[in-house]
Image (tube, rainbow, N blue to C red):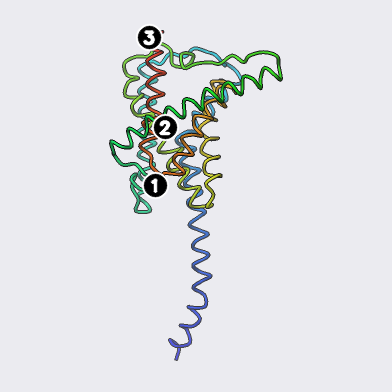
Amino acid sequence: MASSSGTPHLLADSPAIAAELQIIEKRRRWLEVFLVLIFTVGNSLVTAVFLLENSLGISLRMTTVRSLYAIAHESASLLLLAYILSRRGLKLHNLGFQWSIRDVRVGVLVALVAGFAYFAGALFLQGLHYGLYGSIAKLLDARQFFANPSLAVIPFIILNPFYEELIVRAYLMTEVLELTGSKALAITISVLVQASYHLYYGWIGALSMAFLFLVFAIYYARSRRALPIIVAHGIFDLYAFIRIFRLA
């Protein structure tokens, strides 16, 4: 009789228990998102804000030590991401990261669209700035912050697109989308986070880059494929550093 009377009670409580467990799981995932972002881009955000407020335009040498530190940090960040995913039985391919020649070709097209969006956004923002202040804002380029690079920067160039797009695009957008059900919110948060740690380019520069990041985010929200945006990001990084090597 005790077993019989206990069963209905457990069944009655199971929906409440399931709901409570779901709430706990969501809180844990939000905490993981916060911790991943703090570890991966927190230092970059603080540095970007400092340069924006105090030393905008300073020329920093991309020394071997600085390159190796960046490589170590980004490698550790990707390992952290892999660990966080593994706790739920997931891998990077669950974020849409799979090798495909077709995705490489698509990445080139995404880069072209994103490049157009960047220049259109920059023109719009410059026009707005001129209308408000009667002058054109000075745009900084990568040479201001990655001057005189050593050869150690080459593996950094290769790694960086994977680091940024897998963490602040694929992982962040996937988590926000699954936890809120809102593609618009996932796109917005991803673009804001990525633009924020590029503030060392100045407000106009960072907002111009936000148009580029917006294309990446919209593409990912629609396709859930990471390789094309990694390829597109890599094209822009390669172009920037070719200019640095030529003009250093």
Which quadrant of the figure contains the C terminus?
Answer: top left
Q: Which residue is disc 1 drawn over?
A: 84
Q: Local crowd at mark 2 within 10 Å, few (<14), some, or many (≥20)?
A: many
Q: Looking at the rendered structure, which numbered label has been put on residue 246? A: 3
- Near-viewer residue (162 or 42): 162
- Near-viewer residue (199 or 9): 199
Q: Amino acid at mark 1?
A: Ile
Q: Secondary structure at mark 1?
A: helix
Q: Which residue is disc 2 drawn over?
A: 110
Q: Local crowd at mark 3 within 10 Å, few (<14), some, or many (≥20)?
A: few
**In the rendered image, the vertical position of residue 190 relative to residue 120, given as above or below:** below
Q: Amino acid at mark 3?
A: Arg
Q: Residue at x 42, y 33 (%)?
A: 164
Q: Nearer the viewer, mark 1 or mark 3?
A: 3
Q: Local crowd at mark 1 within 10 Å, few (<14), some, or many (≥20)?
A: some
Q: Nearer the viewer, mark 2 or mark 3?
A: 2
Examine the rendering and report whether any part of residue 73 can be seen. Answer: no
Gap in angstroms between the C-alphas marked 2 and 1: 28 Å
The image shows residue 160 at horizontal and vertical percentages of 38, 29
